[in-house]
Image (cartoon, helix red, strand yellow):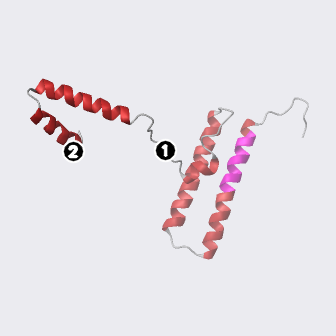
Amino acid sequence: MTTQQLDIWRKITAESESNLEARIKFDKYMEEQQEGMVGIREVRIPTFGEQLVGLDFNPSGDADVHRVKELAAEMAEILKRRYTEDKRTPVKSLLFDHAVGEILNAQMNVVKVITMNPKENETI
């Protein structure tokens, strides 16, 4: 129970003739509060790595594709954390940008290999 709810409970109890009456009024108050919250929902904001690799996009439904994306997202998160925590230099900034691109490139190529369905008559 929140402090605000506790204050309301005390007020209702003081105004009511019995605990039962107070409980009924308090329950009604809580129902009204819940109805007022209809349409409100929490949304989780994806991390940098999840946004980078598109973790929520997997039209194949392949578990290995999802795992590869998770691993790439984790690498990107580690990279971003260290880049923001450590001292930055111009060279480090260039390497960061390049590393982000390489993580994404590797992830996309691995997913391509996993999901590729070669034609029967195709030769290399």
Q: Nearer the viewer, residue 22 or 50?
A: 22
Q: Nearer the viewer, residue 4 or 17?
A: 17
Q: Residues within 10 Å of mark 1 (few under 14, many from 20)?
A: few
Specify the label residue 82 is tagged with.
Answer: none
Q: Main secondary structure of the magenta part?
A: helix
Location of the C terminus (image quadrant): top right
Residue 28 vertical position relative to residue 4 in the rendered view, above or below: above
| Position in image of residue 106 (x %, y %) | 70, 51
Residue 115 vertical position relative to residue 94 in the rendered view, above or below: above
Say which element carries label 1: loop
> Which residue is pictured at 30% across the width and 29% down the height?
31
Question: Where, by quadrant of the figure, is residue 103 drawn?
Answer: bottom right
Check residue 108 for magenta coloring.
Answer: yes
Mark toward the viewer: 1 or 2: 2
Residue type pointed to by label 1: Arg
Earlier sequence position, callout 1 versus callout 2 = 2
Location of the N terminus (image quadrant): top left
Residue matched to label 1? 44
Distance from Cα at disc 1 to Cα at disc 2: 27 Å
| Position in image of residue 2 (x %, y %) | 24, 42
Q: CB under 8 Å between callouts 1 and 2?
A: no
Check residue 122 for magenta coloring.
Answer: no
In the picture, measured across the screen, residue 10 lies left or right of residue 123, that is left
> Which residue is pictured at 9% across the width and 26% down the height?
18
Residue matched to label 2? 3
| Position in image of residue 45 (x %, y %) | 51, 48
| Position in image of residue 89 (x %, y %) | 58, 75
Specify start and end residues of the magenta stretch as a single range: 102-113
Q: Residues within 10 Å of mark 2 (few under 14, many from 20)?
A: few
Say which element carries label 2: helix
